[in-house]
Image (spheres, rainbow, N blue to C red):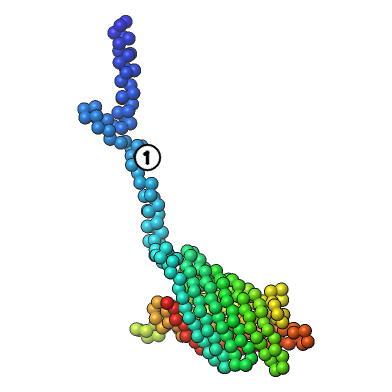
Amino acid sequence: MKNYCALIFLIFLFLPDISMAQRYHIDLDDQQPQPGKTESRDRYSNPNQNRYRNRYKLNSKYPEKRYASRENRSPVFSIELNGGQSTFEARVLSTWLIIPSTVSFGINGLTASDDFYFVSSDLTVGNKMIDQKLSLEIGIRGLGGNVEKGRNESTIGVLGFLVKAVYDIPDIEVTYTRYLDLEIHGEFCASPSPVSFGDTEQYFEMRTGLGINLTENKQNTILVGYRYIKADFDDGRFEWDKTYDAFYFGYRIKF
């Protein structure tokens, strides 16, 4: 009886050590713990390993996003100068890339001899689609200036809805060694009566054209296009409208 009691006592005494040895794979000779599979995954795995692996897969699939953090800090600026049929236009635009969208802010000036002059500012948010070839932006345009027609003269002030679109057409083969890099751009701005101020009743502007990129990085572009403007006024004495349309040529540089 005493022998059985002593045996049971020894079993209960060494049972926790046996359990710990199975968990840590303890070699009873050197008593050095070696973590098992469960403990290795819990204690010794890198918590950032999956995150880095997923980031590598994302960069491999979308190489244009690899330097997103650097591009986010560095906006792209562009200066555009256009002229034609007694008109002159200057545009300055800055664009920030915030993956997967873009935010742009621009200041524009347009004058046509003695007929009118406009100063406007744009704020748009855009995105790219169709294999990164189509860029679509929507936003607002605040515009002010002065318009003359005969004896009529009125101030213009609008807060219009703005839509911009650019479609990239790269690698059009001209000869075996020469390719054209083209873009088609369009711009529409509309300001109905509730968001028209001063003497302005409503305002509409359309601009469309073609761009020829001279460099591979699209930093230098020759522009040719067409512009149409229509504005309705009521100065308290007369109701009249101003319509303007003309072709233009220009040049744009990005840096």
Is the N terminus in the top left, top right, bottom left or bottom right quadrant?
top left
- State the SS at label 1: helix
Q: Residues within 10 Å of mark 1 (few under 14, many from 20)?
A: few
Location of residue 237 in the rendering, given as x and y in whole percent from the top left corner: 78, 87
Location of residue 19 in the rendering, given as x and y in whole percent from the top left corner: 33, 26
Displayed quadrant of residue 59: bottom left
Location of residue 72 in the rendering, given as x and y in whole percent from the top left corner: 45, 66
Question: What residue is shown at x 24% (from left), y 29% (from top)?
Answer: 31
Asked whether residue 224 appears in the rendered view, the answer is: no
| Residue furthest right in the image | 237
Question: What residue is shown at x 42% (from left), y 79% (from top)?
Answer: 219
Residue receiving disc 1: 42
Q: Pick the residue in front: 41 or 122.
A: 122
Displayed quadrant of residue 196: bottom right
Q: Pick the residue in front: 176 or 209.
A: 209
- With 177 as the anchor, is 238 left or right in this view? right
- With 142 as the anchor, is 40 left or right in this view? left
Is the C terminus in the top left, top right, bottom left or bottom right quadrant?
bottom left
Location of residue 73 in the rendering, given as x and y in whole percent from the top left corner: 44, 66
Question: What residue is shown at x 72% (from left), y 93% (from top)?
Answer: 151
- Tell how many labels: 1
Question: What residue is shown at x 66% (from left), y 87% (from top)?
Answer: 147
Callout 1, which amino acid? Asp
| Residue furthest top in the image | 1
Asked whether residue 22 appears in the rendered view, the answer is: yes
